[in-house]
Image (cartoon, rainbow, N blue to C red):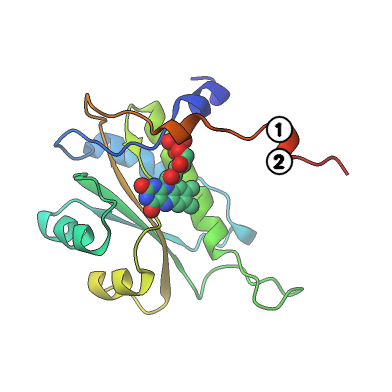
Amino acid sequence: MDFIRLSAERYSVRNFEDRPVTDEHMKILLRAAVLAPTGCNYQPQRIYVVQSEEKLKKLGEISRCIFGAKTVLVFTYDKTEDWKNPLEEGVHTGEQDVSIAASHVMLQAWELGIGTCWVNYFSNTRLEKELGLPENERSVLIMPMGYPSKEAKPLPMHSEYKSVEEIVRFI
Ligand SMILES: Cc1cc2nc3c(=O)[nH]c(=O)nc-3n(C[C@H](O)[C@H](O)[C@H](O)COP(=O)(O)O)c2cc1C
């Protein structure tokens, strides 16, 4: 699909069919995440594929934005592996690296007919503790995903875009 069309048609899906993403589709999505560019190509992004009833239930307690999805990805980065900017104290690329990988997954998913929702509405600390993530990893987002149900539709704000003039400055 043409990229601009895909970007315009994609919307955050919050209503899914009652089945997980197939293994065949998951393989493609994870490949898209691996192919994402990262700072200095250090590839600190980590992805947890959650499909067990037990862990999905736990995620549902941690965030109200799971939307009954049967597959949820948890995106983290390894704090010891991301690129640290030597020219700016405290600036490092982990969140950016993860965001690019997650965007690849989100857009590849749409091309496969899979809906996703980028979710930040949770306590990172609680998530990391309750999923037993390694000390050296920081969570960035979770992504419920699945095949959109018949009832799935974009929220009105989906199509409220600022104009190019409002967000771009030629300097
Ligand atoms: C960084 C980020 C955080 C978000 N967090 C949430 C969230 O916690 N819960 C939710 O339902 N949607 C969340 N969203 C989805 C946005 O609300 C949605 O992308 C935005 O309203 C535009 O709508 P659209 O994705 O349908 O085009 C998030 C999106 C981004 C990019």
Residue 83 in the image: state x and y as whole percent: 61, 68
* Quadrant containing the C terminus in the rendered view: top right
Give the residue furthest to the left.
53
- 89 shown above or below 83: below
Element class at badge 2: helix
Looking at the picture, how far across and down is residue 143, in whole percent? 34, 49
Q: CA distance from mark 2 to mark 1?
A: 5 Å
Q: Position of residue 38 (x, y in %)?
A: 58, 55
Q: Say if residue 29 shows up in the picture.
A: yes
Tell me if I can see residue 118 in this picture: no
Q: Residue furthest right?
A: 171
Q: Amino acid at mark 2?
A: Ile
Residue 112: image location, x then y, percent: 35, 28
- Using the image as rendered, state which of residue 29 and residue 162 is in the foreground: 162
What residue is rendered at 55% in x and 25% in y? 3
Q: Which residue does the numbered mark 1 point to in the structure image?
A: 164
Say whether mark 2 is within 8 Å of ligand 1.
no
Q: Residue at x 51, y 53 (%)?
A: 99
- Element on which disc 1 rests: helix
Residue 23 is left or right of residue 7, and the answer is left
**Which residue position holds label 2?**
167
Find the residue positioned furthest to the front. 156
Q: Is residue 171 above or below residue 86?
A: above
Q: Residue at x 26, y 55 (%)?
A: 64
Quadrant position of residue 70: top left
C-beta proximity under 8 Å, tags 2 and 1: yes
Q: Amino acid at mark 1?
A: Val
